[in-house]
Amino acid sequence: MSAMSKVTKLVLVLATLTACAERGTSADPNDWPVYGGNDDHTHYTTLSQISPANVAQLQVAWTFDTGDAFEGSEMQANPLVIDGVLYATTPKLQVFALDAATGEQMWRFDPNDGEPPASRIRHRGVVVTGDRLLFNYRNRLYALDRATGAPIPTFGDGGWVDLRKGLGRPVEGLSVNASSPGVVFEDLFIIGSSVPESLPSAPGDIRAYDITTGALRWSFHTIPHPGEFGYETWPPDAWKIAGGANAWSGVTIDSKRGMVFAATGSASYDFYGANRLGDNLFANTVLALDARTGERIWHFQGLRHDLWDRDFPAAPALVTVTRDGKPVDAVAQITKTGHVYLFERTKGTPLFPIEERAMPGGGLEGERTAERQPFPVLPPPFARQRLTVDDLTQRTPEAHASALATFHAFSTEDPFSPPDTSGMIIFPGVDGGGEWGGPAFDPATGLLYVNSNEMGWLLKLVPSSDESLYASNCASCHGGDRRGTALGPPLEGIMERRSRDQVVSLIREGTGLMPAFAAAMNRRSINHIVDYLETGRDASAEKVGETPFDLPYRTALFDIFLDHEGYPGVKRPWGTLNAIDLNAGTIRWSIPFGEYPELTAMGVTGTGTDNYGGAIVTENGLLIIAATTYDNKIRAFDKLTGALLWEATLPAAGNATPSTYMVNGKQYIVIACGGGKNGAPSGGTYVAFALPE
């Protein structure tokens, strides 16, 4: 882009800022102004230039290589497009603005000050309102000038607010960020947070900040303080030391009613809760709050005393359904277990029956499981609910034998059996069922579209006083004396050669032949290993119970249930795409979603794969989605039948939700191609598609 055209574009942006400030975000149907496309988070568009009749003609219009990908990185942003300018983030969480018609960069902001991030970062987008862009980098909530990308010095402390403050805990040692964007209501910016799933962990308070100054205006305590609703569902001091119960997947705003909706995750530590006995309200809860004050209007807790990391994985979707021939405004909530809850929006009344089912008891010493859990009767689950021998893979005899051996070693009598030291298979797994991409909703048909994962996860706990973490995870390759073996280099003196952050990143992300341990070990366990490498003393087997955060059990194994060749240990399909009728409470259609290219080449098709990111649905008949982890495809389906109409190969997996917009009379579809999930190659490219001239 020439210097003059860049200036012209910036002038056009500045000319619209006053109007945008008045209406919050763009009201132009040609834009994709907020995360998920609209405030309802329904991923719906009325743009119609791309149609079922011509979608097969789509071709690449432009690409933008961030130049930012690194081994193991991911890029999950849903780009915003307002007034012809596209805003998104890179794998290293730099923020940029592009000419949405050409993909040419207009400005870029680097919160790392030129230094690479210490570890992989997951981030799903930004917020644009009035003259500013709001985004989160680690514990910093930034406000940037929308036209230039420069921090706005009057916001917070020189352009940013510290998200660790205002939580009622010492700031030092707290880890707080926001992987999903917040929402704007009047002069407030409302946001959830991502916090550690092990202890110590920050509480998951939902908070509202003044858009202009960055001042904290209100907080909703998801771990209730004394005198607050739900306080009795936790131990008396839990509000001081417990963590989690956080709306990590984002929040949803109903501006007309002045209501904000959130869906929260589990309490920390995920898998053992003797120090948090009780139902643990407001963990695993759909919340409706007054957007002006943060006061609770209604709530529904979908899982009491969660011990399986079964967070509500996506922000609520605001939908309108038909009951007795009349429209009813509602809230739809998907789950990791493959269910859909549907509530009347203002009072939270269930629109389909919910039944209470008795749960298995037992568990580790000191544990006390919830006696009953709620389940929606309709719609039917969109994911399998129980794993038996008959559900194990039949891909090859060897694969079945491998899966059968694991099944017997980790056999689980009930999907809600509590974790123990023998090991269990969590199914549906902790990555769903549904995931953070969330559903798309078509108001014309009442169909809710959900992509689902169909994989089990292995979980095993051990006493914290058992064999050291180094001995159980590292010694086989690096030697019990840290002097190395044929399989791994020596680790003596590694803390003299690398910084602590670098060593933590190596353990979390892996390198070369060394696997990543981020999924198998929590932050505290990784720090114990680094402490051992630094001091030679293993704290993981010492001093259990000396602090409120020291628990008698820790995670020894936490990973996907795979066969001997690395494919899921359950029968196909391993991923699905589903259309659910919210008016009738039925599943309209369900198809396998995704392929493994190497299996396809052998004639094994229709496998489905794990998938991350959501779909967009068009008024004129299309369902457009990337998401699949291993085939690097973006696809368009007939929204009524699930028939495939078009597909294209991306430079890396599009584990994100696409955006669609129109500039200069041309409609585009853009997707972030970040890859990096579950061992897939990483990428850092945005690709836009359009019809030929």
Image: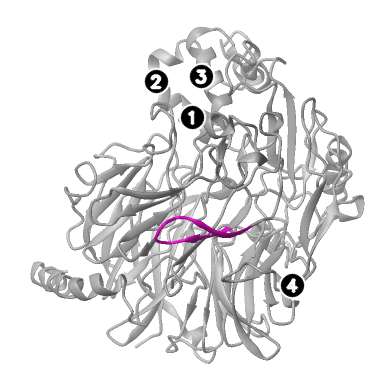
- Image quarter in which the N terminus is found: bottom left
- Image quarter in which the C terminus is found: bottom left
Magenta region, residue range: 287-299
Would residue 348 appear left or right of 289 to someone viewing this image? right
Q: Is residue 386 visible?
A: no
Are discs 1 and 4 less than 8 Å apart at CB? Answer: no
* Spatial separation of the CA atoms under disc 4 and disc 2: 56 Å
The residue wearing badge 3 is 530
Q: Identity of the amino acid at label 1?
A: Leu
Rendered image: mark on residue 352: 4
Circle nearer the N terminus (1, 3): 1
Give me the residue at 41% from left, 27% from top.
170
Give me the residue at 11% from left, 73% from top.
8
Residue 472 location in percent, x, y? 68, 20
Q: Residues within 10 Å of mark 1 (few under 14, many from 20)?
A: some
Circle nearer the N terminus (4, 3): 4
* Spatial separation of the CA atoms under disc 1 and disc 4: 48 Å
Residue 294 magenta-highlighted: yes
Tag nearer the camera, 4 or 2: 4
Circle nearer the N terminus (2, 3): 2
Q: Identity of the amino acid at label 3?
A: Val
The residue wearing badge 1 is 506
Of residues 591 and 584, the one nearer the viewer is 584
Give me the residue at 18% from left, 52% from top.
150
Circle nearer the N terminus (2, 1): 2
* Spatial separation of the CA atoms under disc 4 and disc 3: 50 Å
Are discs 1 and 3 less than 8 Å apart at CB? Answer: no
Rendered image: mark on residue 498: 2
